[in-house]
Amino acid sequence: MENKVVGFIPKLLFRVFLALKEKFDPKQPVPDDEKITFEICYKLLENVDSKLTLAPISNKRFIKNEEKDMFIVLHEHSVKLINHIYSYSVYISNTQLYTQLVDKFDKVLDAERLKLETEINNNIHHSLAEILKKLD
């Protein structure tokens, strides 16, 4: 019986906290420039011509698309869009949007690395087969 009382009160207090937080600290709407920047990045990530690079020490993510003449740097909620005419730096204040971008980037980059790994392994198997043939 005591466990239910101890569990009930914290749950109740947490619900009250969430209700008050939403009331006094409502979520701000995402500004248009952040939405547009997100869409640009997302489309470039889905474009097969985009080249992705991750700098592991600085944790910067780079997207380069020569066909669209675009270069993007993602770093600490900041997105820098560059081409030969303009350069924009947009801070993505919405954590959910920025996390979606980083997750998409990481998934696309990981898929590229898996393709590379498969190609390397196929070359190793082919080479081993050739060595075996030469021994016959």
Image: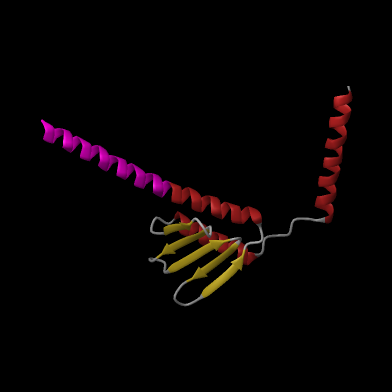
User: Coloured how?
Assistant: secondary structure
Outermost residue toward the top in this view: 1
Q: Nearer the viewer, residue 14 or 38?
A: 14
Q: Is residue 58 magenta?
A: no
Q: Position of residue 54 (x, y in %)?
A: 47, 57
Q: Is residue 86 above or below residue 2?
A: below
Q: In terms of secondary structure, what is the magenta stretch mainly?
A: helix
The C terminus, quarter of image: top left
Q: Which residues are magenta?
A: 111-136
For image coordinates 46% across by 67% down, the residue present is 71
Q: Is residue 135 magenta?
A: yes
Q: Position of residue 26 (x, y in %)?
A: 78, 55
Q: In the figure, is residue 90 to the left or right of 135? A: right
Q: Position of residue 11 (x, y in %)?
A: 83, 36
For image coordinates 52% across by 68% down, the residue present is 81
For image coordinates 46% across by 59% down, the residue present is 44
Outermost residue toward the left in this view: 136
Q: Nearer the viewer, residue 49 or 76?
A: 76
Q: In the figure, is residue 17 to the left or right of 37? A: right
Q: Position of residue 56 (x, y in %)?
A: 49, 55
